[in-house]
Image (tube, grey):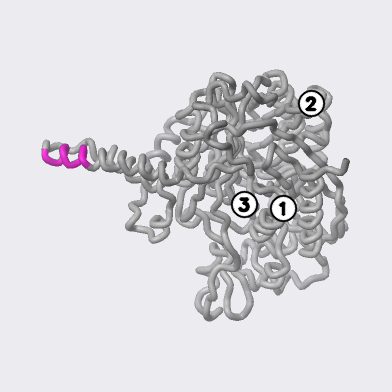
Amino acid sequence: MTRKTNPIQTQKRASQTRIVPFTQRATHLFLPKPALSFTIFRKDIDYLGGKTMQSFAKKIITLTLSVLFICLAAAANDDNNVGSKKVPLKDRPSDVKGAAENQALMVGVSEVNITPPVGTPMAGGFQPRFSIGVQDPLFVKAIVLESEGKRLAYVILDLIALGREDGDRCVEKASRLSGIPADSIVWACTHTHTGPYTGPIFGLEESGIDKQWLASLPDAFARAVAEADTRKKPASMSVMRSFVVGIADNRRITFKNGRAINTWNLAAAGEDLGQSVGSEGPVDPELGILAFDDTKGRLLAVLFQYTLHTNLNFGKYLSADYPGVVYAKLRERFGPNTVTLFVPGACANINSWGYSYRQVGETISAAIIAKLDKRKPIAGAVKLASLKRDIDIEYRDLSADQEERIKAAFFAEKDRDVFRRELEVMRKQGFTKARTVLQAWRIGDVGFASLPGELFVEWGLKIKRESPFTWTFPVTLAGDYQGYLVTEEAWKAGGYESLIARSAKPAPAAVAEMSDAALAMLNEIYAPAK
Ligand SMILES: [Zn+2]
């Protein structure tokens, strides 16, 4: 079901992309050096159309200085190769080629197009938006790793979310086709808001979902896993991280009266709320990168984690949003065989304010490429492990005063009915508790904890802080979809994520239990009982 991108639309959109001079936004000053350099470089390329020799010479000097700046910035940033085993210099391979020879790691990748037919309603808003074309295709992508007799598959879908039933169907089929145990197949969704609905939510019920397309998903998922498995070849792994600040904001602003308002509703809230006392919580600027090369030093796969909502495009065309830009940029740099897989971080309350999906994608890509250009494979065996466990959770109190919460969240009148209806549906269908799933897994010295919903950044940072692994990446929208996984503070302060809806079901106490259980599972796979 490949759909062609509309070149006219793509071109139009590309030309609308504005590179914001860093002097225009204070936040740009905090961009990491490679990203900043990249911006300047782009501006200089544009300058080369100058007419006089004098200005041309000036531009050449500027360009040279920019290139020099990029080199210096990249060098300055090369200080944090991660992986708890920092490889002693003498053991480091002189280059990526040949690095796999003393390792038994095998890696394969595959991607299958899952773009639905044009016209499919797109999820992510309070009402469906009907797609009128394809900006960039949606994929299900799989990486299969094998080491010390253990296989592990990570699968990422360019979808807003996926419920457990559909996810389990995908996993069962993939397991049957590849022979990889179901417990060792982990999946997550990118959370693109320019993709199809996969379940009833907000303005679209069961009848509006493209059932035929949804029924084709397990085949595509299983094919991706099985293909990745058969394509496995000896590989080496590099683990790195960078920081990208300035493009992500905590989207909840708190007020002196204890309320929190989402950034997009601040204008509606006006000045009556009195003094604002800042962002409710932090952001997580860490950019995690795992890279896998074959024995010839060709980059097979890149896993990257960033903590930012995938809701920046929000246009009329189907698109993978900013991760799609990263996929394309890495291919541009490393060739068509490099498959990039997004690992979504605890992004529930993190939005980008004032940046386009292209700017965000390009900034993240530049930071990833700067690190990849200096990747150094780790030595020794890469330990793989995975643990999947069901957990019973309580939902939010359906008798809570939703009307008061709706009013305090400052949603427009037309949107308030959406939440009234959500509560009605949940009461009617008896949404009081659920059995959902958690997963902990490791690739070498990097631990991952997968949670079944949109995890608040505070929880993600807690998991990172308390995990026994030196490097841990919380993975959201994984294994199931239970909606927003808020903190107790956020529940009390109100706002969008704290309204009761099918997009926000678990009680805050249940999220604390999930976080504790995920940490316990990380501990189990870190030091398994003999
Ligand atoms: Zn979301």
Magenta segment's dominant SS is helix
Residue under label 1, please give it.
467
Whether 68 is drawn above or below 278: the answer is: above
Whichever of labels 3 and 2 marks the residue nearer the N terminus, that label is 3
- In the image, residue 1 above or below residue 74: above
Q: Is residue 21 above or below residue 419?
A: above
**Residue under pointer 2:** 149
Relative to the observer, which residue lies in front, 127 or 10? 10
Query: Which residue is drawn at the image coordinates 50% and 26% (left, top)?
Result: 95
Q: Quadrant of the N terminus?
A: top right
Q: Amino acid at mark 3?
A: Gly
Which one is closest to the eye, mark 1 or mark 3?
A: 1
Crowding at dot 3, Cα within 10 Å, few <14 / some 14-19 / many 20+, comes out as some
Left or right of 329, for residue 194 = right
| Residue 207 position in % (x across, y down) | 76, 42
Residue extent of the magenta highlight:
54-61
How packed is label 1: few (under 14 Cα within 10 Å), some, or many (20 or more)?
A: many
Quadrant of the rendered image containing residue 189: top right
Tag nearer the camera, 3 or 2: 2
Residue 258 in the image: above or below residue 139? below
